[in-house]
Image (tube, rainbow, N blue to C red):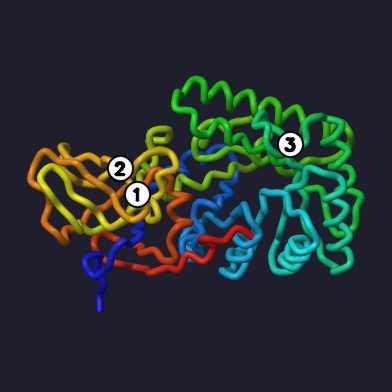
Amino acid sequence: MTLTQSSLDTPALLIDLDAVDANLATMREAVADTGVTVRSHFKSLKCAGLARYLWKRGFTAFLAAKLCEAEVLADAGVRDLFVANQIVGPQKIARLVDLAGRCELSVAVDDASNLADISRAADRAGASLGVLVEVDSNMARCGATTNDEVVKIARQAAESPGVRFAGLQGYDGHNQHVADPEPRRAGCLASLERLLGYRRAVEQAGLPCPVLTTGGTGTYDLSPHGEGVTEIQPGSYVLMDCHYVRIAPAFRCALTVLSTVISRRPGQYVLDAGYKAASKDYDLAQLVGRPAEEKVLGMSEEHTRVATTGEPPALGSRVELLPSHCCGTMNLHRRCYALRGERIEFAWPIEASGRYD
């Protein structure tokens, strides 16, 4: 039996596979002549089925913000993983070391004592994992901030049991959502220059630096051309949202929330999906394929109010919402439906949604 969009109850999270395919093609073309690897960020996806979909189309490298995300990826058969965050404390380090026995794993570190804890645990378990020293690329969040500090941690990783020095991570998240192209470009170039300076310091200390990973969806067309960059780490490019598409319009919006009209009156109607179904982190959700006179007025937990100067749609009518944050929206749902046109090709659980460990 062929299932279609009309068979779904609402709210339902939809993924347009034709749009996903177009986005993968756009990203593939962007790095085609650079030799740079696209390491897709699983924090935007949260869904093992979607990760496998990317993997089958040649996007086999992933990074995760959380251990739970990396564990979901390993369970799905992904073998090239980077946990792009600091893993601190005995419980999480034990999980990290266990994960290293299941895949080719690297982790971000910006502290010598944390690195020592990871090294001891990995050595005791007979495991081996890569260490990328996280550096501050002008973001002022995590990351070592001086050449001496970066070199010290890199040398410690190169000389410690159970770990190996793999390179540098310098995510420039502060550049990803800059709306004006020129300031975004200037910020990206400044971050790349700072990252390159750290790499030069490491290499001058006699340590090879095989990996230099940076960038995201907002700088997908800039970061791959930075000197020495080996990887970029975009995630939102796969699904996109009504906020990010204004910054990176080469990508298509693939993620929507299907909702139902549950109330109507002159000049307004109400949908059964609010901000618990469609994230409004950056702005209100937008309507998909509706007349121009219809505008989202506001969103509460379970409702979206829509103003209209025309006749409100009938009760039971279906309306798609375009969220303002794809990552936040994937984290709200436990299942998504991947479609070609109206036909549902996959019903995927979202295994890492609602998890923060």
Task: Find residue 135 and name its label.
Answer: 3
Q: Is residue 45 left or right of residue 226?
A: left
Amino acid type, mark 1:
Ser
Task: Find residue 300 and name its label.
Answer: 1
- For the residue pair 304 and 159, the one nearer the viewer reads as 304
Is residue 17 visible in the rendered image? The answer is: no
Which residue: 70% across, 69% down? 102
Amino acid type, mark 2:
Gly
Crowd rating for badge 3 (residues with CA inside 10 Å; few <14, some 14–19, many 20+): many
- For the residue pair 72 and 80, the one nearer the viewer reads as 72
> Vertical placement of 239 versus 77: above or below?
above
Residue at mark 2: 298
- For the residue pair 235 and 354, the one nearer the viewer reads as 354
Is residue 131 visible in the rendered image? The answer is: yes
- For the residue pair 11 and 22, the one nearer the viewer reads as 11
Which residue: 85% across, 69% down? 125
Residue 34: quarter of image: top right
Residue 251 x %, y %? 39, 41
Crowd rating for badge 2 (residues with CA inside 10 Å; few <14, some 14–19, many 20+): some
Which residue: 43% across, 53% down? 329
User: Residues at badges 2 and 1 in contact (C-beta under 8 Å)?
Assistant: yes
